[in-house]
Amino acid sequence: IGTTSGAISGTDFNEHENDFEISLGNSSIWVQTHLIHYRPFVETSAATASSSRGSKSAQETMPSTSSGGGGGVATVKSTTASALQSVIQLTTSKSTRKSKSSKKLDAVWNDGVVPVPLSPLSFYMRRRLNDSLSVQDQSLEVMSLLRLLYGLNRYWFSLYYSPYQMELVPFVEFVNSKLTAKVNRQLQDPLAIMTGNLPAWLTQIGNSCPFLFPFETRQLLFYMSAFDRDRALQRLLDSTPELNAADSQDRVTPRLDRRKRTISRKDILKQAESIMQDLSSSKAMLEIQYDEEVGTGLGPTLEFYALVSQELQKAEPELWNRESVQNGALYPVPLSKHAKSSNLSKIRARYKFLGRFMAKSLMDSRLIDLPLSQTFYKWVLGHESTLNLADLAYVVPGLQKTLIKFQKLIVAKDKIERNEELNEREKSAQIQSLTLDGCSIEDLSLDFVLPGYQNFDLCRSGRNEDVTIHNLCRYNDLVVHWMLKDGVQRQMDAFREGFNSVFPLSHLALFYPEEMNQVFCGNSLVWDTKMLADCCRPDHGYNSESRAIKFLFEILSTYNQQEQRLFLQFLTGSPRLPVGGFRALSPQLTVVRKTFDQNANPDDYLPSVMTCVNYLKLPDYSTIE
C-alpha cells in the first residue's frame, strides 16, 4: 500500500499526461510501509495444470508466509503475482492507447499522411437507435428511418465534393408535435421531478433523435435530467411561473445550497481559477460579492461570469487563433508538435479552467460572454473526427477560401489523370498548365509551413519542401488537419477534463453544434416597442400608458448591438439575454417610478437598478431627450 506525498522534488507533474506512469518510476513517493495480514491462496490442481509455467514464475514473486497459523505477513515491497499482473495489464492497455495515438501523429509528422475524416453520416447509419434503450415499441423502427433521413438531409454534401454545408429541408420539418407535447407534459410534472421518476425513455430518445423536439424542449429536458433534483425544480419554476401559486409553494420549493465568495475586481481571472478549482466537484450554487461593495446575489454573479469571459479572450499566453478573434468566433490557437513544454503546460491549465468555468456556468444557469466558434463546439460534442475543409469557414474563412481554390485545382488534376484518352505526355502538359488566377502553384513560393505561423512545420523538414501541383493535395490536407485537429488536440483534451470534473459532457448530446452558443451564451432578438411592451412589467407609479415608459421603449428599440449589450450589463449584470430574450428573464423585468423629494426635478437624476431582481427605477422624465 503506497501513500503518495503532495510534492515530489525534481518532478513537474504538469509536464506529464499520465500520473500513474510517473508514480511507478519514482521510488521517492513511497513514504510509508504497511503490514498486510492475509490468508495464502491455495491453487487447485486444475488451475495448476493449466498454468504450470505461469505458476512457477508467480511463485518466485509470491511473498513468503509463516509456517504456522494458516496465515502470513508481507510488506508492500513484496507483492502478489495477481497484483503485478493487474498493474501490467493496466499499464499495457494505457500504453497501447497511447502508442496508437503516437503512431497516428508520427505518420502525419514523418510521412505527411493525414487520416481520412470520418463521414458525419456514420452516426446516423446505425440500425438501432440506442443499445441501452429500455423501451420497446413499434415506432422505434420508424424513428430509426427518420434519423437516417435527417442525417441525409443534414449531411448530404459529405457524399459529394462540396465545401458548403446547408440542409435540403428545414430542420423544423422533422419536429414531432405530438411527441413534443407528451414530453413537455412529463417535464412539467412537479411530482415526477421531486421523486426523480422521469421516464428513462425521455433522455434515451432525446439523445438518439434530438431532431424530433424543438430546442426549448431539449433544453428543459437537459436541466431536468443532467443535474440534481433541486436544480431541476428551480428550472421548472423559472419556466412555469404558475407553479409558484400559494397552494403549491410548499410542494415545489427547491433547497439549493449556496457558496458565497468575496473577490477583488483586480486580477479576477486568477481568483476565478482558484474558485473553480475549489467548487468543481460541489453541487452548491456559486454567489459572488466584490470587495468593498454592498451588492451580492444574482447580479454580481452574472457580472463575474461576464468579466471572466472577457479576460479569457485577452489572456496570456495566447489561447485563441488570431483570425478567429477578429471574426468573433473563437477557436484555439494551433500548437506545433514541438511546442515548448512550459508554454504548453500553461495553455493546458487555462483550457482545463475554461472547461470547469463553462460547466459551472451551465450547471448554475449563468450566461457567459464567449463567442466560441461552431467548430469548437464540434470538439465539445465529440465530433472532431468529422472535421474537414468546410469547418475551416468558422475559424479562418480567408484561409478556407484559398484552400477551396486549391481544392478545385486538385479536382481538375485528378480528372486529367483519370482521362484514358490522354497519353502520359499530354497529361503532364495539361497538369502543368493548371494555374490559380493565372499563376502556377510553384510560382506562389509556398512551403509546408502552417499559414500565419512561421515556426510551425506541417511535417518533418516542412520548411524545406516546396508546394507544387503534385503535392498540393497533401498540403491542403495537412493545413486543415493541423489547424482543426492535431494542433488543438492537447488544448481540447484539457478542456474536456476540466468540464467532466463538474458534470459529464455526454449530457450535451441533446444539442447540435450550431445550438451550443445558445446553450452557453443565450441569444439576441430584435428589440421593438411591441416586444418590449409584452415582456416588461410597469409597476409602482407606472403603467403601459405612462409617458416615461413609452419614452424608454422607443429609445431601447433604436439601440444597436453594442448599446444593447451595455444596457443589459447595466440592468442584469450580464451583456446577454437567455434563450427567449426579455420574456425569459427570471425574475421578469420590472420598471418602477423613481421617487425623490417633493421639490426635486426628475430630469436631474439618472436611472438605477437592482440587478438581482431585474428591477429598473426610472425617473419620470419630462421629455425623451
Image (cartoon, helix red, strand yellow):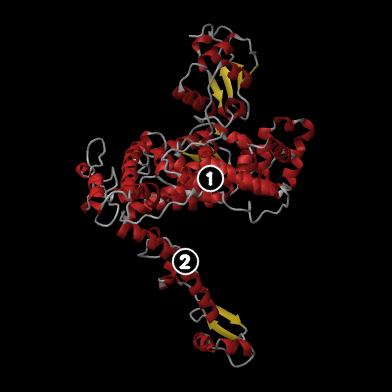
Kind of element beneath mark 2: helix
Q: Is residue 513 visible?
A: yes
108 horizontally vs 237: left or right: left
Return the x and y of residue 434 as percentages of the image width and height. Answer: 26, 42
Q: Which residue is mark 2?
A: 94
Q: Which residue is mark 1?
A: 359
Q: Residue at x 53, y 31 (%)?
A: 523
As shown in the figure, which amino acid type bears the numbered disc 1?
Ala
As shown in the figure, which amino acid type bears the numbered disc 2?
Lys
Q: Nearer the viewer, residue 465 or 349?
A: 465
Q: Is residue 226 visible?
A: no
- Classify 10 Å Cα crowding around label 1: few (below 14), some (14-19), many (20 and above): many
Return the x and y of residue 13 as percentages of the image width and height. Answer: 40, 61
Return the x and y of residue 151 as percentages of the image width and height. Answer: 55, 44
Q: Name the outermost residue toward the bottom.
A: 67
Return the x and y of residue 221 as percentages of the image width and height. Answer: 65, 42
- Name the front one of labels 2 and 1: 2
Q: Are marks 2 and 1 in contact (CB under 8 Å)?
A: no
